[in-house]
Amino acid sequence: MKTLTKAEEQIMRVLWNIGKGFVRDILEELQEPKPAYNTVSTIVRILQKKGFVDHRSFGNTHQYYPLIDEDEYKKQYLHNFVKNYFENSYQELVSFFAKEKQVNLNELEEIARLIQQEIEKKKGD
């Protein structure tokens, strides 16, 4: 899967949120300072070429909608991130944040609880 630039991701977040929309709809959802209409239009067309969005035509205008689910993108993005920066080890990722004190005790306990639930599920399979 191709990665998104920050601008592309911003547009995708809007489309994931609204489901489908015209360029003007996307523009309305963006925070100030808003990019120009033509900028948003260009980014949406790039996203279409990358296979992230498609459109329905209504005369001269196009209504865009995502082709990829937000959760699927997150999963692929995180997988690639872990692969490229943590030697494909989620243990290394968690260890990094724990050592950097970026994860507080409550978060570590919640992570441990979630991991234990997954262990129990896998044992049951």
Image (cartoon, rainbow, N blue to C red):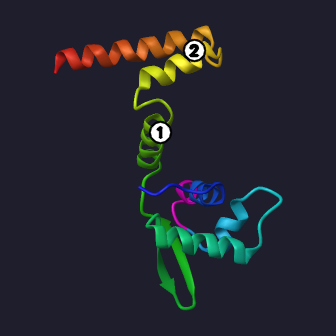
* The magenta segment: 15-20
Residue at image point 68% right, 73% down: 24
Q: Position of residue 42 (x, y in %)?
A: 63, 75
Residue 26, above or below 80: below
Residue at image point 61% right, 17% down: 103
Residue 113, above or below 52: above
Label 2 residue SS: helix
Identify residue type, mark 1.
Answer: Asn
Residue 10, above or below 37: above
Identify residue type, mark 2.
Answer: Ala
Q: Position of residue 89 (x, y in %)?
A: 41, 26
- Say which residue label 2 marks: 98
Q: Could you classify mark 1 by the number of other residues whose Cα lies within 10 Å: few (under 14), some (14-19), or many (20 or more)? A: few
Residue at image point 64% right, 75% down: 41
- Say which residue label 1 marks: 84
Label 1 residue SS: helix
Q: Position of residue 77 (x, y in %)?
A: 47, 44
Question: Which is nearer the N-term, disc 2 or disc 1?
Answer: 1
Q: Position of residue 84 (x, y in %)?
A: 47, 39
